[in-house]
Amino acid sequence: MDSLENLVISFIDVEANKGLFRKELAGILNVSPNLIGEPFFEYHTINGVLKQFIFVDINMDLSKEDLLKIPFTYFDGDGYLVFDAGDVIL
């Protein structure tokens, strides 16, 4: 039963940190957090390494100056800002 409780707590932590991520990104851009979409995660395994990425949509046009303020890794083909969330060796 303890492991299930730990999983629930971990899930709640992830959901709370999504809100903090949106709030922090909105603060960098000086906009309302409502303009920042719900972040989601993607994982890719490459040669025994789990690569973790956070995808987020920003519902406004960004200037070059705004983009330079954000430490994102790349844009994906669907217009999401992608942040490298680190690697885990399996």
Image: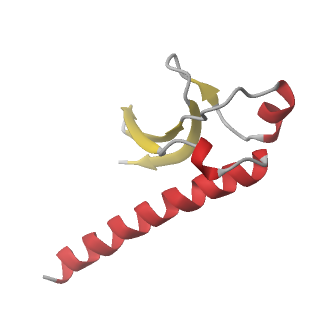
User: Which residue is outermost to the right?
Assistant: 65
Residue at the image position 18 percent from the left and 74 percent from the top: 4
Where in the figure is residue 52, as x and y percent of width and height?
46, 42
In the image, 30 versus 73, the foreground residue is: 30
Q: Quadrant of the N terminus?
A: bottom left
Q: Quadrant of residue 40?
A: top left
Residue at the image position 73 percent from the left and 41 percent from the top: 71
User: Which residue is outermost to the bottom?
Assistant: 2
Where in the figure is residue 15, as x and y percent of width and height?
41, 61
In screen coordinates, is 68 left or right of 52?
right
Where in the figure is residue 73, as x and y percent of width and height?
65, 33
Residue 19, above or below 29: below
User: Which residue is outermost to the left?
Assistant: 1
Residue at the image position 58 percent from the left and 61 percent from the top: 20
In screen coordinates, is 71 left or right of 59?
right
Where in the figure is residue 72, as x and y percent of width and height?
67, 37
Q: Total of numbered circles in the picture? A: 0
Tell me which colouring the rendered structure shows.
Answer: secondary structure
